[in-house]
Image (spheres, grey):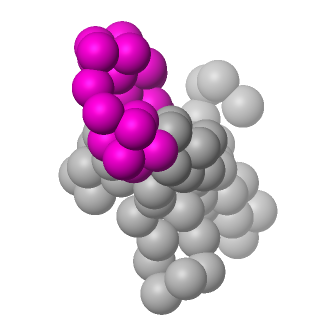
Amino acid sequence: MMSIFGEQIITESRRVGEAAFLSKWHDIDEKAKKTILIIMIRSHKYQKLTAYKFSVISYGSFTKVSLRLVKNIQYFAPEFRLAFF
């Protein structure tokens, strides 16, 4: 469940720079242009949700943890072998 929220944070933070670029920044004053430029530069480093600053919470990390769990279960309890492994 948390991986959905983590993935949404990553996806939406990547869209911020694009939205700033697509705004009508060329029609505004210089101070606002500099602010938009800072937003676009900072958007290159996306925001992320972490677990105790240890791991990024996303679909990719959820998949890694799930596969490790399945492999550990199969190692310690071979009777629980799954058909796709």
Residue 73 position within the rendered picture, expressed as x and y whole percent measured from the top left: 61, 62
How many marks the image carries: the answer is 0
Q: Nearer the viewer, residue 12 or 80?
A: 12
Residue 30 seen in render? yes
- Image x and y of residue 15, in percent: 38, 28
35 magenta-colored: yes
Question: Which residue is drawn at the image coordinates 46% and 58% (left, top)?
Answer: 48
**Residue 17 picture quarter:** top left
Q: Position of residue 10 (x, y in %)?
A: 43, 43
Q: Which residues are magenta?
A: 11-36
Residue 83 percent location from the top left of the image:
61, 25
Does residue 16 appear in this view? no
Give the residue at x 48% y 87%: 52
Q: Is residue 19 above or below residue 74?
A: above
Which residue occupies 59% across, 44% down? 41
Q: Is residue 41 above or below residue 68?
A: above
Q: Main secondary structure of the magenta part?
A: helix
Q: Is residue 46 left or right of residue 11?
A: right
- Quarter of the picture containing the C terminus is top right
Residue 73 belongs to the span the image colors magenta? no
